[in-house]
Amino acid sequence: MSEQLELYDITIIGGGPAGMYAAFYSGMRDMKTKLIDAKEELGGRMLIYPEKMIWDVGGVTPILCEKLVTQLVQQAKTFDPTIVLGQHITGLERQEDGTYILEAASGERHWTRTILLAIGRGILKMAKLELEGAERYEVSNLHYTVQELGPFRGKRVLISGGGNSAVDWANELEPIASHVTVVHRRDQFGGHEKNVLRMKNSSVDVLTPHEVTQLYSSNGHSIERVTIRHIESEETQQLEVDAVIVNHGLKADFSGIKDWGLHMDDWNVFVGPKLNTNLPGIFSAGDFAAYDSKITLIAGAFTDAALAVNSAKLYMDPEAPYMAYVSSHNERFKEKNKALGVTEE
Ligand SMILES: Cc1cc2nc3c(=O)[nH]c(=O)nc-3n(C[C@H](O)[C@H](O)[C@H](O)COP(=O)(O)OP(=O)(O)OC[C@H]3O[C@@H](n4cnc5c(N)ncnc54)[C@H](O)[C@@H]3O)c2cc1C
């Protein structure tokens, strides 16, 4: 290797609850740690629901999710890991000595003895309207998000989708737009029941189970008309529109990593009892790791993280203790307790 890279004991990919807790725990195990996330912010999927009250994390009384993220970030930084944000890891090269070089899509490289994949559902992207040529209208009147209501004033708006956001946007646009139609493949809608009822009891036209099958434009620039089809009868009808808003949820992207030779399916990597993948020195924790009796919750992510880090430590040093201890034997906590003003016997 001609380039000058610093070797880390463990590189954790993914800064959600699993990755953040692993960054703390690997510090407890005296491992030189790097934590990488594709986003510019730590928190993982918890960043999607900052306003939610979290009730089901042991020892934590109901807490706003964004506050729990702040505390997790603080804990992750306890032993000063190197934190790298804004890098989407895609490449992997195994070196002759068994170490690995990871590569980001943007070209940065990272050298490591072990890897912890805490990548949850991968890089989440908006699911696009899967109709030929749809992308050309993204610059005019095909929207995947509503940032401002103003541009929809007086317009005939069609919303495709039935998630939380689709329902919220329908309710917000109803008094502003000249007409709102919601088209959804299922009869059931996501989101709060009271918001769904509000939408159904308003002037919004709710068409289920329907889907958008074609977009028309006479000027080639903006959508003027759409065909919608009833899912069961396959009957179609045309609607004149001024704007189309699509809310088809999020799609997982494991690009790069799915070519590493891991034993995985569309959503998960299969791990053994040590949270080990089929590749030597590569472990997984959190929602990405699949095994019997798996719990895809924050609390499960913490347990996975501790187990996987212990396995990585033992992979590097088979003589190391099985797990970390918070005790007077752990010098690092002795110092930190002193800094907190706690004196120990
Ligand atoms: C709406 C909602 C509400 C929820 N409510 C609760 C609740 O009340 N209680 C509870 O316990 N759980 C709840 N959950 C579940 C919980 O959020 C997940 O179980 C948890 O976030 C999983 O953590 P993780 O660290 O495995 O993955 P994630 O939180 O998904 O984090 C993965 C991180 O990896 C990064 N990443 C992915 N691929 C790469 C790559 N190639 N390179 C670099 N970075 C990458 C992503 O950017 C992301 O930041 C909820 C989930 C949702 C969606």
Image: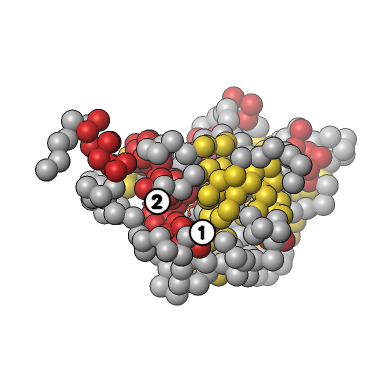
Q: Secondary structure at mark 2?
A: loop
Foreground residue, 122 or 186? Answer: 122
Q: Residue at x 57, y 27 (%)?
A: 148
Query: Residue 243's x, y, as percent?
Result: 69, 37
In the rendered view, tell whether residue 184 sits above or below residue 20.
below
| Residue 339, placed above or below residue 301 | above
CA distance separating discs 1 and 2: 12 Å
Tell me, yes or no, if residue 236 can be seen here: yes
Is any atom of residue 308 visible in this view?
Answer: no
Instruction: Say left or right for 46 vs 263.
Output: left
In the picture, the disc for residue 84 is none
Give the color scheme: rainbow, by chain, secondary structure or one colour.
Answer: secondary structure
Front residue of 168/250: it is 250
Residue type pointed to by label 2: Arg
Q: Position of residue 8 (x, y in %)?
A: 56, 46
Circle on res. 29: 2
Taking the spot 25% from the left edge, 40% from the top edge, the residue there is 334
Q: Quadrant of residue 36?
A: top right
Helix, strand or loop for disc 1 = helix
Which tag, 1 or 2, sits closer to the chain's start?
2
Q: Position of residue 99 (x, y in %)?
A: 63, 55
Where residue 201 appears, as percent x and y from the top left, is 45, 47
Count neighbours of disc 2 (C-alpha within 10 A) and say few if under 14, some if 14 to 19, many if 20 or more.
some
Indicate left or right for 61 with 190 as reference: left
- Which amino acid type is shown beneath numbered disc 1? Met
Residue that numbered label 1 is attached to: 316
